[in-house]
Amino acid sequence: MENRTTPGQLLRTAVAEEKPLQVVGAINAYCALLAERSGFRAIYLSGAGVANSSFGLPDLGMTTLTDVLADVRRITAVTRLPLLVDVDTGWGHAFMIGRTVREMIRADAAGMHIEDQVAAKRCGHRPGKRLVESREMEDRIKAAVDARSDESFVIMARTDAVAVEGLDAAIERGCRYREAGADMLFPEAVTELSHYRRFADATGIPILANITEFGVTPLFTRGELAEAGVSLALYPLSGFRAMSAAALHVYRAIRSDGTQREVVKDMQSRAELYDVLGYHNYERKLDELFGKEEKQ
């Protein structure tokens, strides 16, 4: 059997080599190709992205493991970039969390983050979040680690405690999650750079900063995050938000003008699309196959 570097190993190597590692959200396979072409070394599938883009639903825990896996498989089929996946609260008790881990590994995901909100979760930058007790989250992490068949697969713990219980309590949770086996930590809704440094110093594991637009976390630069000890900088829905605004602009122009002439300049060209997809390579293969048939 051919030995290959696993997706988890690719992610861990990227984290070690790029400080901080920029992880960009890719809501579908084509976005993954664009991210790869742009030079990113890791990509991300957001739970909100799956709910919003694939189902037209808000990020309120209404999608399932099967829903998310469908998008994971489509993405990992077209790129070797390591994919970090948002699994919300893991979709159930210990056995279900274990199944989530096994299915993510089978789908070639590089890692996943699991959070400490209650099952009826909310967006991390919205009010009204409720958390499970630290012990329950520790059990979630232990169940995930126990189910891992590939030791390189990353188990990342997300805590929403900063906004709910305060910074000190969140750091204490982070330390407990590390002891439970978490490889990396995702403190959500952090508002100050110095807070990332405190998480990093206290836990001793890689820290992810969620640099999402229109949330409570300022849009810190990569340099600022590096100085604060951050290991991964996440941009979960930047591309999706830009795509959505662009699509709405074009739809409105066509509806109001009766033509797309004025907005063609804003579109990706057919040639650019074909270049990303390697379209002409497929055409050449068809020509080779048809050529062989003609000679027979």
Image (tube, rainbow, N blue to C red):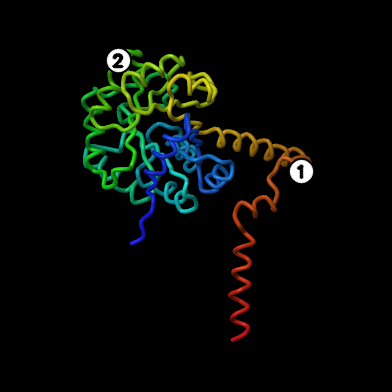
Snapshot quadrant of residue 133 = top left
Residue in front for this viewpoint, 236 or 80: 80
x and y percent of residue 284 in the render? Answer: 63, 67
Give me the residue at 47% from left, 30% from top.
19
Q: Amino acid at mark 1?
A: Gly
- Observer-side mark, 2 or 1, equals 2
Which numbered tag is attached to residue 272? none
Asked if residue 67 lies left or right of residue 227, the reply is left
Of the residues under marks 2 and 1, which one precedes in the sequence? 2
x and y percent of residue 69 in the render? Answer: 39, 47
Task: Classify mark 2: residues with Cα within 10 Å, few (<14), some (14-19) or many (20+).
Answer: few
Residue in front for this viewpoint, 112 or 250: 112
Snapshot quadrant of residue 97 = top left
Could you tell me if the residues under marks 2 and 1 are in contact, i.e. CB atoms within 8 Å?
no
**Where 41 falls versus 271 (above or below)?**
above
* Residue that lies at the very extreme toward the bottom in this rendered image: 296
Give me the residue at 39% from left, 46% from top.
7
Which numbered tag is attached to residue 169? 2
Which numbered tag is attached to residue 258? 1
Give me the residue at 74% from left, 44% from top.
264
Q: Amino acid at mark 2?
A: Ala
Asked if residue 198 lies left or right of residue 228, the reply is left
Asked if residue 3 lies left or right of residue 26, the reply is left
Snapshot quadrant of residue 208 = top left
Quadrant where the image shows the N terminus: bottom left
Q: CA distance from mark 2 to mark 1?
A: 57 Å
Give me the residue at 60% from left, 70% from top.
286
| Mark 1 element type | loop
Residue in front for this viewpoint, 185 or 121: 185
x and y percent of residue 117 in the render? Answer: 32, 26
x and y percent of residue 224 in the render? Answer: 51, 20
| Mark 2 element type | helix
